Image (tube, helix red, strand yellow):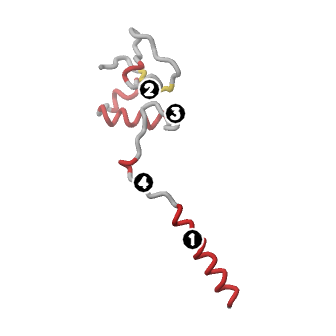
Amino acid sequence: NQVLRNELLNLNYQKEKLLEVMPKELEASDITVRMGATWIPERDYKNFMFHLLKTSASNRWNIDIKYTLYPVPSGESSKADCVSPKVLAQASKCSK
């Protein structure tokens, strides 16, 4: 019985010490993300773009997002400045 009691005291002590050093819980508004962050999957950018622009399902088939290291030259049908230098929106048209 005493061994179990000592183990529980040790666990409680460790728990208290861990709680002291745990970072505060973040809210969604505490997190900022830069467009083009490569740790975000392309499909999430795509879904965000469709949601933001209210893209109809019939128009989604011709739109894709791909990561690129270089901006697309102006005059091309896919303009990198539509989204960011690192995220390329490939579509037939891209309004500014």
Q: Secondary structure at mark 4?
A: loop
Q: CA distance from mark 4 to mark 3?
A: 21 Å
Residue at which label 3 appears: 38
Which comes before the other along the chain, label 4 or label 3?
4
Q: Nearer the viewer, mark 4 or mark 3?
A: 4
| Residue 11 position within the rendered picture, expressed as x and y whole percent measured from the top left | 62, 75
Q: Nearer the viewer, mark 2 or mark 1?
A: 1
CB within 8 Å, label 4 to label 3: no
Which comes before the other along the chain, label 2 or label 4?
4
Q: Secondary structure at mark 1?
A: helix
CB within 8 Å, label 3 to label 1: no
Q: Secondary structure at mark 2?
A: strand
Residue type at mark 3: give it: Thr
Decide: few, some or many residues near mark 3? Use Cα within 10 Å; few <14, some 14-19, many ≥20.
few
| Residue 31 position within the rendered picture, expressed as x and y whole percent measured from the top left | 41, 45
Which comes before the other along the chain, label 2 or label 1?
1
In this view, the residue farthest toward the top is 75
As drawn, the label of residue 15 is 1
Residue at left offset 38%, top offset 48%:
30
Residue type at mark 4: give it: Leu
CB within 8 Å, label 2 to label 1: no
Residue 5 or residue 42, whichever sits in front? 5
Residue type at mark 2: give it: Asp
Q: CA distance from mark 3 to mark 2?
A: 16 Å
Residue type at mark 1: give it: Lys
Residue at which label 4 appears: 26
As drawn, is 44 to the left or to the right of 8?
Answer: left
Q: In the rendered view, would you say 83 is above or below 52?
A: above
Residue at left offset 36%, top offset 32%:
49
In this view, the residue farthest toward the right is 3
Residue at which label 2 appears: 64
